[in-house]
């Protein structure tokens, strides 16, 4: 299970669990890209078998009612859904 990395300014470890068909997920990716930030994402709906189960297990650790996007910043902050202000706050922007 390999996350896709988008290169940019490193403001910390940003990992995002998304769905390829989710409009809010696309909007969050676009926001991070427009901010010029480095982040990684995993389109969970494109995974199969054990990879999908492993991804969902990881999401549930952070977001018990798994919804998308689930954004984990520096392995300590979780932001669920599209929320520019919360993302900026967590990254100190």
Image: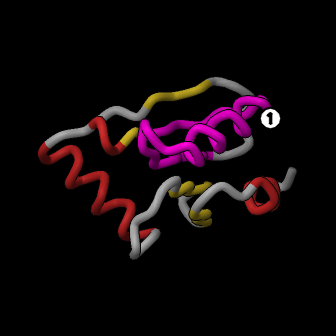
Q: Which percent across, then down, holds residue 51?
A: 21, 44
Q: Quadrant of residue 25?
A: top right
Q: SS for tag 1?
A: loop
Q: Quadrant of residue 45?
A: top left
Relative to 16, is 90 above or below? below
Relative to 63, is 28 above or below? above
Which one is in front, 70 or 26?
Answer: 26
Relative to 17, is 48 above or below? above
User: Residue drawn 48% across and 56% down?
Assistant: 68
User: Residue drawn 80% across and 35% down?
Assistant: 35
Q: Is residue 37 left or right of residue 53?
A: right
User: Residue drawn 73% across and 39% down?
Assistant: 31
Magenta highlight on residue 43? no
Quadrant in which the N terminus appears: top left
Magenta highlight on residue 17? yes
Relative to 83, is 60 above or below? below
User: Circle 1 is placed at which residue position?
Assistant: 35
Q: Which percent across, then down, holds residue 26?
A: 58, 38
Q: Which percent across, then down, holds residue 46?
A: 29, 36
Kindly give the residue lying farthest to the top in the view shown: 7
Segment tinted magenta in the rendering: 13-42
Q: Which percent across, then down, holds residue 39?
A: 60, 37
Kindly give the residue lying farthest to the right in the view shown: 93
User: Residue drawn 60% across and 55% down?
Assistant: 74
């Amino acid at each position: 299970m390999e996350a896709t990395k988008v290169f940019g300014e490193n403001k910390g470890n940003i990992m995002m669990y998304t769905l390829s068909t989710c409009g809010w997920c696309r909007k969050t990716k676009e926001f991070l890209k427009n901010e010029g930030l480095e982040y990684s994402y995993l389109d969970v709906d494109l995974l199969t078998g054990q990879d999908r189960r492993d991804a969902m297990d990881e999401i549930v650790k952070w977001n018990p009612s798994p919804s998308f996007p689930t954004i984990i910043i520096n392995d300590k902050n979780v932001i669920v859904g599209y929320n520019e202000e919360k993302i900026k706050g967590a990254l100190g922007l």
